[in-house]
Image: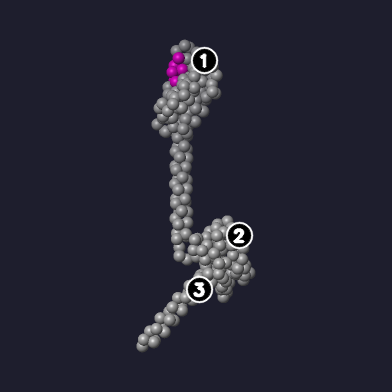
Amino acid sequence: RGFSWPPRSPMSVSAGLSVMLVRRRLGSVATHTIVQATVDLGVLTLILQACGGVGSGLGLLFLVPIGGLGFLLRPRSAWFLAALASLAVLFVTIGEQVGGRTDIGAYATAGLLGAVLFTIATAASFVAGRMRESEALVRQKDVDLANLAELSQYILQHLRESLLVVDAADNIRLINASAAQILGNVHAVPGALLGEVSPRLLYSLSTWRQSEGRERTPTTFVAADGGWVIQPHFAPLGAGPPGPTLIFLEDTSLMAERVQQSKLAALGRLSAS
């Protein structure tokens, strides 16, 4: 759709054919790139010959496609195209010298242009290689971070200890299933406000913040469903004062039950003696 008919230049014909072949998946993208670049270099060679050779200064037009192809192709392919461009410039110079339209000094200009083309291709290939390595490293880091986040989430959700993380705005950042069960609130999910989930826990957290994080005698409160007696423990996260807070929830009713069972067991052993 993007090409007019009849085609206006050989480059547009080649580009149209390349697009058709790529869409039909006939050959690799690198092959089509090399073919298209060869056609472009051939057209630039004809332009250079028509304008009087390297003495016209149009040989610099080869720098743009060679440098761009150095980013797209592998170093060998970029050097191959740089060699083609250098040979094309050399043949044009030979033709100009044979026809008497230039002197022998044009060979030095042609050789210098060929050296510049190889330098541009090598530099572009080196930069492209470093960019690909950096991209691969970033992708690997993203995969590692995603795996680490999944592992942390799995460990957090399967811990027996009940814990949650609350930010400075009293929003729940993290919470595991055990903590949600102890709080007895179905809305105890990440992103919820702590005051809506457990006002008593928010009061304890505010009291702890007012004491500037000093150790105090922890207070207990009953969960919303009345089935748990909770004793919270707070620990700051981060260096700044308005940072998030890690909260451990301890079920004191379970601890009291265990103490009671231990007392009954001791009384049983005493009675048996």
User: Over which residues does the magenta segment extend?
Assistant: 88-95
Dominant secondary-structure state across the stretch colored magenta: helix
- Which residue occupies the foreground of this view, 195 or 34? 195
> What colour scheme does the image use?
one colour
Marks 3 and 2, Cα distance to the nearest angstrom? Answer: 26 Å
Q: Residues within 10 Å of mark 3 (few under 14, many from 20)?
A: some
Which residue carries the number 1 mark?
A: 50
> In the displayed structure, would residue 17 be above or below residue 217?
above
- Label 1, residues with CA under 10 Å away: few <14, some 14-19, many ≥20: few
Residue ID at (48%, 28%): 66
What is the number of callouts on the image? 3
Real-space CA distance between mark 2 and mark 1, rounded to the nearest whole angstrom: 76 Å
According to the picture, the residue beneath numbered tag 2 turns out to be: 193
Q: Amino acid at mark 3?
A: Ser
Q: Is residue 119 at least partly visible in the picture?
A: no
The mark found on residue 253 in the picture is: 3
Residue 271 image-quadrant placement? bottom left
Q: State the quadrant of the N terminus.
A: top right
Numbered disc in front, either 1 or 3? 3
Front-most of 19 and 81? 19
Residue depicted at 44% across the width and 78% down the height: 261
Q: Is residue 152 left or right of residue 220?
A: left
CA separation, marks 1 and 3?
Answer: 96 Å
Q: Which of the two discs, 3 and 2, labels the residue nearer the N terminus?
A: 2
Q: Earlier in the sequence, mark 1 or mark 3?
A: 1
Q: Is residue 268 on the magenta stretch?
A: no
Q: Inspect the image, locate mark 2, and give the three-letter code of the amino acid beneath it.
A: Leu
Q: Is tag 2's residue or tag 1's residue first in the polypeptide sequence?
A: 1
Residue found 44% across the figure and 47% down from its top: 140
Depth check, mark 3 against mark 2: the one in front is 3
In the rendered image, residue 163, in percent from the top left (x then y), is placed at 51, 64
